[in-house]
Image (cartoon, coloured by chain):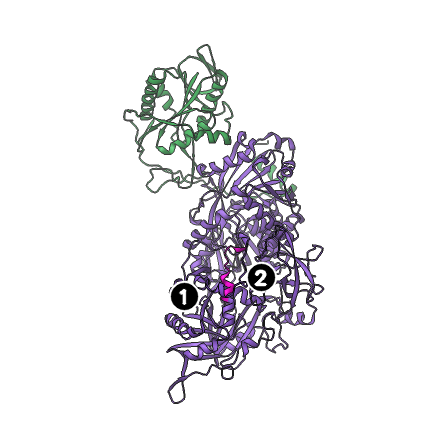
Amino acid sequence: MSQFPTRAKCVVIGAGIVGNCLVGHLSKLGWTDMVQIDKGPLPNPGGSTGHASNFIFPTDHNKEMAMLTLASQQQYIELGMNNTCGGIEVARTPERLEEFNRRMTSAKSWGIDSKLLTPAEIKELVPFINEKILLGGFYTPSVSVVDSLQTGTLMRESAVAAGNLQVFANTEVLDLEVENGTIKAVVTNKGRVLAEFVVVACGVWSPRIAAMAGANIPLTPAVHQMADVGPIDILQQSNKELAYPIIRDMDTFCYERQSSGSMEVGSYAHRAIFMHPDDIPSNEASALSPTELPLTQDDFDPQMEQAIDLMEMLGDAEIKYAINGLLSLTPDAMPVLGETVEVRNLWSAAAVWIKEGPGIAQLVAEWMTYGYPHLCDPHSSDISRFYAHEKTDHHIYARCDEHFNKTYGIVHPREQWATQRNMRRSPFFPREEAAGATFFDARGWERPQWFASNAKLMDKFKGQCEERPSEWDARWWSPITNAEHLQMRESVGMVDLTAFNEFDFTGPGTMAFLQYMCVNNVDVAVGRSVYTPLLTQGGGFRGDLTIMRLGANHFRVITGAFDGGRDKYWFTKYMPQDGSVTFTDMSSALCTIGVWGPNAQMTMAKATQNINAEGKLVPFDVSQANFPYGSVREVLIDGVPATMFRISYVGENGWEIYTKMEHGLRLWDSIAEAGKEFEIIPVGMGVYAVTGRIEKGYRLMGAELESEYNPMEAGLNRAKVKSADFIGKADYMKARDEKPAALMCTLEMIDNTSKSGIKRFPTGGNEPILTKDGERIVDTKGRVSRVTTAGAAPSLGKYLLLAYLTPEHAIEGNELQVMYMNEMFPVRVARVGSQPLFDPTDARMKS
Amino acid sequence: MNILVCVKRVPAPGARINITEDGQQVDTAFLGFTVSPHEECAVEAAVQLVEKHGGEVTVLTLGSVLAEEQLRTAASVGAVKAVLVPIEGMDWDAQRTASAISSAITALETTNGNYDLILFGNESADSCGYQVGVRAAVKLGRPMVNGAKGIDVADGIATIRRESDAGQEIYNLPLPACIGVREGINLPRYPTMKGRLASKKVEIQRTEITAEAGGLKMIQLQRPPERVSNTQILGTGPEAASAVVDLLIELGVFK
């Protein structure tokens, strides 16, 4: 055996599906001098890969997960490790049948051949199933079982054969050394290796290993029960590893998967059972393997009864093997990928299941190589998405406990968490609660979505507050949102924006630093602001935010609750380390109220004052002449020092108003008082984030704006490009010279009446935009047209959809279709590019 | 025929057995529990005898309420009655255990009549005393053969086969009798799902007992020093063949 090295470019810890595929991909991308270690033996070191069921159902409602799964399946195919057997999700309830319509829609979006089956058709494919208890099925012929151990071995050996990798099994990590915030060395029982990069691909052990470097990978090992029962005659007689489609018994949260002469029965129905990574037994002390723990039989018994109901033959088959298998769960059920926020060059590739393993390995390898992945936008998996309170055991256990039984659940796109609520409250909370707010969770913040106190306005705007007859369409939604929208457009509304993140950058190097981070020129006059995208190294969207210039060397970045963690990481990663720039996270120091509407200026004119040159308190001139759109002013509002920023995300005249948290309630009350004569109302996020925004065609990071798209395609490019260099500039310049492969468009539904005669309202969950012939629209870069946001436009009397279309379809007036719940609805392209449908000249904001 | 099988709940450890800090127990925090392979075979032998001759199998264990798991496992493969003899504490050596079991059996037989056969595992998987079955048989005044690798019953006689260095030993025992069963006598079946579900419905009878004190006391558990083995890779592929041959010659496998 070769000597344990003292130095390496990159050490990958873990030889499961992720670590193995990662070294393979890194090798292909030109990485040399790599070392891979695992504390267990090869080829099965005892992690979750070793006991995985190894099947792939490719359809997922989440785009990122669907892309990663399809890429993974393709890699398994290319390695000859993909055994296609087909798979059927079966329904025992009407709600599940409806969910299958949604799955058909997502399958269409991702180009996955699928069809709905009657119980009799299920029986034809699976003769031993009890179709009498079923209502129908969702069949995907491409469902497969893969050999994850052999795939990993091939990938690992490809890197070894290329001379780029040395592998050390039975090698335990004892410590990770960090110097000046950067990973330095891995200490093992075989020796110490200096490393420029270290990747934690340790599955359920990842938090324990990362903690050695002071980094946090928020996941918990959790039990998934499975049993192998057999032999069963009909399966033995098939003489095949997989002769029958895999069955997912969705309403009992179980699956049945043939394994030669036996059937593997797995469950996500039992109570959530967690284990701390420190408590997982060693390879030596384990009866089977560290992640194959003894079955807690009582938890499995109810599932056995349900399995026998579905397949009677299972009842007489012997239970040969049954385990509490450990797998990784995270607080939001997505993987944890990317460079850790705490330690430079220490990467996480954790909380990954077999079905997405090779794709994620490719994505992480690209990320490490190019600065950002190419495969797809990783924002839902990005490790930097978590806020501090989301990385605690408390949060991890509470959320994982909540979502574990939703593994096969029917989860609404707007579904709200029940646990870990009231983690963060704005100072306005008491007023909002009194106004009957329905709160939605925004990364810990309680944000009003709509207010019961505004229900009375529905009479005023009768006919403009659509009813949604389908319970699904109306779930986590209220027609009050339309009323709030219309009242704001008619008079004035106030919006709680405290969930915003505010990052202050000061010091002599700030200007140069921010120029390098941002596409648009930040060298504006003090008291002015910049709206700007941030780009990836490849010229795709990495961020989208506004920056106020508060002083010569003082800039304040404003970004949303869902991007705060990622943006903070991105800025601090690139920030000069020479002391020329100081970063201060002001997010917990400041609260924000948006005040918008035709009467916003009159409202604020009553409340604002400042101190003039003679030291006297005088009314502040809030006119557009003195205080134009895009400018920032320090004022007193009823005596409260505040920063007013004239801008709007809802297309109305008005401000974002910032003050210290402790002044917040007074500020709220003062504005409410000043606006009383204009019938000012509190307005929820239903308006701010959906109806107000979509009428203006404003793009949202994570929805329309992803790293797969560039500013030309999104319609956010400026006429000129600044001379200063910035991240992604080369590709941005290239994109400006090319014909965009897709264009962001606003579409209107022409008729949203379903076959059953009721009006339907797409939720904006990746529903495909199709040609009149029902064909998918895929651009030259392989990206599919799908709904990125959907919502009512109460002021236009329309229901709008945002979607990227290829240039031949991106023609105003062009008629297409949207698929929703497996039904087609006619749509028309109402706008190509960023010009708003409502108030196209933005006159309202600037008058 | 009515057969009683006695089993003992023991941990199912990996290669390395961890001991609690006080040295008094095996650390079972993350271990499952089972019975010894001999006892699994005893249950299987009993079930097969009943399948052939009729009657019923009862399973009995001495232990805490947790040992119900082992009773139900036996029930899931064919035992129809289960008896838990509740005990507390750790100081249950073979002598005391045998006393308790014989006391329980006497109580059960007073109500139900004698068991035709009482089966034990050859030895337990944890303490490996080889004594409980023999001691209980003596107390009950029944004939006993340990190490059984074959059991046939006909005309009130149990014919026991056991292996010895010299060949096979055959014993004929008049019923009622006790037998210590040895692993390998049969291949125990796994529980079926239906068996498992049925076992949940089996009522577990509790029997109070009197037991004499034992003479053996456990002082402390100790783990023997670990043997460290170093893996030496002799080579890969056909090139490794000559090195393997050299090693086999060195070890005396080849000459």
Q: Point out residue A168 in the picture as x, y percentages from the top left corner.
A: 54, 50
Q: Position of residue A110 (x, y in %)?
A: 64, 54
**From this viewpoint, is residue A529 visible?**
yes
**Label 1 residue SS:** loop
Is residue B91 covered in magenta?
no
Q: Amino acid at mark 1?
A: Ser
| B61 relative to A307, above or below | above
Rendering colour (chain A):
purple
Chain painted green: B
Horizontal arrangement in the rendering, residue A117 relative to residue B100 (left or right): right
The reply to the same-chain question for discs 1 and 2 is: yes
Q: Is residue A476 magenta?
A: yes
Mark 1, Cα crowd under 10 Å, few <14 / some 14-19 / many 20+, is many
The chain under label 1 reads A
Q: Earlier in the sequence, mark 1 or mark 2?
A: 1
Residue B173's place in the image compared with A161, above or below, is above
- Magenta-colored span: A473-484
Looking at this view, name the residue that lies furthest to the bottom.
Answer: A614
Give amino acid for label 2.
Thr
Give the residue at mark 2: A789
Q: Quadrant of the C terminus of chain A?
A: bottom right
